[in-house]
Amino acid sequence: MNAGILSNSAVTSVLAFAFSLVGCLLAVHSFARAINAAGSRGRFGWLFLGAWALAATAVWDMFLVAAIDLQTEGLQVRYAIISIIASIVVSVFLSAGLLWLVLRQATTFGILLGGALVGSVMAVDCFRVLTAIRVNAVVTFARP
């Protein structure tokens, strides 16, 4: 039996985009607040909140909302919850740590390198999302 991904409606795709957009906006706002925060403790707190918004909201929530539209033709869709939680925790702490290091020495090269590293963490996080979905079927991508 085959299962088509995202073949039902555009509503969940729009909602997934909205979740990702809100997560990115919250992350950028938090990063801006971190730059202006007094003291390293306050700065790391804002960076942590920004990393949480980026990893948990912009990546994971977006994918999980998009997965609601998974047409399974009666098949049960399950998620590897432990894998999801572990991936969120690792990506949040890794992103926050990388951003904190960038803010300590904010040079042009450091900002570019930090952005590339955080982007790499988010890219790996996106692939982790796909491995967390469990469907006992052959999955194909259908064009609407």
Image: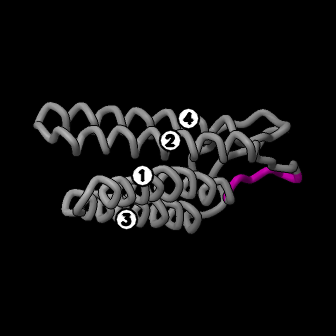
Taking the view exactly as shown, the residue that stands out farthest to the left is 108
For marks 3 and 4, give the CA distance.
22 Å
Sequence-wise first label, 2 or 4:
2
* Residue in view at x 24 percent, y 63 percent: 37
Q: Magenta residues? A: 69-74
For marks 3 and 1, give the CA distance.
9 Å
Residue for badge 4? 127
Near-viewer residue (78 or 89): 89
Sequence-wise first label, 4 or 1:
1
Residue type at tag 2: Ser
For marks 1 and 2, give the CA distance.
8 Å
For marks 2 and 4, give the CA distance.
12 Å
Instruction: Sort mark 2 into few (<14), some (14-19) or many (20+) by Cα contacts within 10 Å.
Output: many
Above or below 100: residue 117 = above
Query: Mark 2 and mark 1 in contact (Cβ < 8 Å)?
Result: yes
Near-viewer residue (64 or 92): 92
Sequence-wise first label, 1 or 2:
1
Quarter occupied by the N terminus: top right
Q: Secondary structure at mark 3?
A: helix
Residue type at tag 3: Leu
Residue 115 is covered by the magenta coloring: no
Checking the image for residue 91, the label placed there is 2
Residue type at tag 1: Ala
Q: Secondary structure at mark 1?
A: helix
In the image, which is nearer the foreground, mark 3 or mark 4? Answer: 3
Sequence-wise first label, 2 or 3:
3
Residue for badge 1? 51
Above or below 88: residue 45 = below
Sequence-wise first label, 3 or 1:
3
